[in-house]
C-alpha cells in the first residue's frame, strides 16, 4: 500500500503540443505588451526587489535606445520560445527583461503588481528549462515518471507559480490581520467610497457598470454583506493550489479567480488584467475545452443522425 502522501502529489496531465504552443503564444504577447519603454526613469531612488536585495542597477532598462534594441531582439526570441526552440536561451532573456522593467518601475517609490505574475512565471519556466537542459548536458537527464512530459512540466511549473502567488497573498492577509481579515473587511465600504470619489474627481465621470455600483452600495450600507461577498475570494486564493491537480480543477479555480479579479477591477478599482490573462492562458485553457465541446457536439450529432436512420 502506497503512503497517503503519494496521493497528494499532482498526477501529470498529458498536454498536447497545440495547447502548449497556444499558451506560449498568448503568454509571449502578454509579455510584449507589458514591456513598455521607460523613458523617464534614470535612477532607482527607492530600490525594490532584486535592486534592494542584491544592489543590482536596472537603470539601463530606462534607456529608450537600449530598450528599443532589446525589444527588437525580443521578437525572434519570442518566436523561438513559442516553437520551443533553445528555451535555455530564450527564457533567461525574457525573464531578465521582465525583471528589469518591473524592478526599475517599482523602484521609483510606488509599488505596482503589474509585472509580478508575469515575471514569476518566467522565473519558474526558466528554472525548469535550465534544470532540464543542464541535467541533459551532464549525462544525467531528468527522470520522467507517471506519464510526465516536458510539455506537461512547463505548464505545471507555470500553474504552480501562479498558485504560489495567490496562496502567499491569502496567507499574508491572515497573518497581517492576525486572523481577523474577514471581520475587518466589514469596513471596506469606507475605503470604496474614498476610491470611487478619487476616480470621479480624476475623470469627472463614473465609468462602472450598474452591478458594480449596486455591490459598492450594498457593502457600504450592510457591512456584514462584505464578509459574505469577500470570503469566497479569500478561499479562492488559499485553495488556488488545487488548480495544479488536473484540467477540471484548473478550469474551476481559473474561473473563480477570474471572477474575483473582475469584481476587484470594477468594485475596488484595482488593476488585475495581467492576472486575468495568465489565469485564462494556463488554467482555463480555452483551446482544450473548445476542442472537448466541439468533439462532444460532433458525437451528439452523429448519434442523432443514427437515430434518424
Image (cartoon, rainbow, N blue to C red):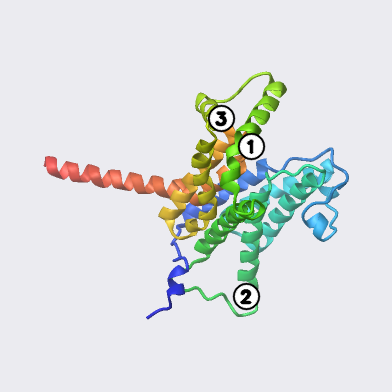
84 and 264: which one is in front? 264
Pick whichever of labels 2 and 3 is earlier in the sequence: 2
Query: Nearer the N terminus, badge 3 or badge 1?
Result: 3
Say if residue 297 shows up in the picture.
Answer: yes
Q: Up-down: is 15 above or below 259?
A: below
Crowding at label 3, few (<14), some or many (≥20) Cα neighbours within 10 Å? many
Quick check: 192 left or right of 37?
Answer: left
Q: Which residue is mark 1?
A: 270
In depth, the one of 267 and 302 nearer the eye is 267
How far apart marks 2 and 3 lie (CA) works out to 54 Å
Q: CA distance from mark 3 to mark 1?
A: 14 Å
Mark 2: give few (<14), some (14-19) or many (20+) Cα within 10 Å.
some
Left or right: where 290 falls relative to 238: left
In this view, 42 is above or below 193: below
Q: Residue at x 67, y 25 (%)?
A: 197
The percent coordinates of residue 166 (x first, y second) are 58, 52
Observer-nearest of 97 and 45: 45
Residue 287 in the image: state x and y as whole percent: 44, 47
Q: Earlier in the sequence, mark 2 or mark 1?
A: 2
Quarter occupied by the C terminus = top left
Q: Is residue 189 above or below residue 171?
A: above
Badge 1 element? loop
SS for callout 2:
helix
Q: Which mark is residue 135?
A: 2
Amino acid at each position: 500500500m502506497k503512503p497517503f502522501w503519494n496521493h497528494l502529489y499532482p498526477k501529470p496531465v498529458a498536454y498536447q503540443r497545440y495547447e502548449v504552443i497556444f499558451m506560449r503564444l498568448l503568454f509571449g504577447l502578454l509579455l510584449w505588451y507589458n514591456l513598455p519603454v521607460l523613458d523617464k526613469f534614470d535612477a532607482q531612488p527607492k530600490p525594490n526587489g532584486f535592486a534592494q536585495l542584491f544592489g543590482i542597477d536596472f537603470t539601463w532598462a530606462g534607456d529608450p535606445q537600449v530598450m528599443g534594441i532589446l525589444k527588437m531582439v525580443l521578437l525572434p526570441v519570442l518566436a523561438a520560445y513559442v516553437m520551443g526552440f533553445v528555451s535555455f536561451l530564450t527564457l533567461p532573456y525574457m525573464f531578465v527583461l521582465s525583471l528589469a522593467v518591473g524592478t526599475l518601475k517599482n523602484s521609483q517609490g510606488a509599488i505596482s503588481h503589474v509585472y509580478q505574475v508575469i515575471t514569476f512565471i518566467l522565473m519558474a519556466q526558466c528554472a525548469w528549462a535550465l534544470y532540464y537542459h543542464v541535467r541533459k548536458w551532464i549525462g544525467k537527464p531528468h527522470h520522467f515518471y507517471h506519464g510526465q512530459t516536458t510539455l506537461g512540466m512547463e505548464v505545471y511549473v507555470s500553474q504552480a507559480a501562479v498558485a504560489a502567488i495567490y496562496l502567499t497573498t491569502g496567507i499574508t492577509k491572515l497573518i497581517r490581520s492576525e486572523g481577523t481579515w474577514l471581520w475587518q473587511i466589514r469596513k471596506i465600504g469606507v475605503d470604496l467610497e474614498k476610491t470611487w470619489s478619487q476616480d470621479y474627481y480624476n475623470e469627472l465621470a463614473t465609468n462602472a457598470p450598474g452591478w458594480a455600483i449596486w455591490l459598492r452600495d450594498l457593502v457600504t450600507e450592510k457591512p456584514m454583506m462584505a464578509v459574505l461577498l469577500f470570503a469566497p475570494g479569500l478561499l479562492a486564493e488559499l485553495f488556488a493550489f488545487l488548480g495544479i491537480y488536473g484540467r477540471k480543477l484548473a478550469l474551476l479555480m481559473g474561473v473563480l479567480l477570474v471572477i474575483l479579479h473582475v469584481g476587484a477591477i470594477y468594485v475596488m478599482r484595482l488593476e488585475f488584467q495581467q492576472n486575468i490573462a495568465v489565469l485564462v492562458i494556463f488554467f482555463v485553457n480555452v483551446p482544450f475545452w473548445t476542442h472537448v465541446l466541439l468533439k462532444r457536439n460532433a458525437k451528439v450529432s452523429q448519434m442523432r443522425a443514427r437515430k434518424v436512420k
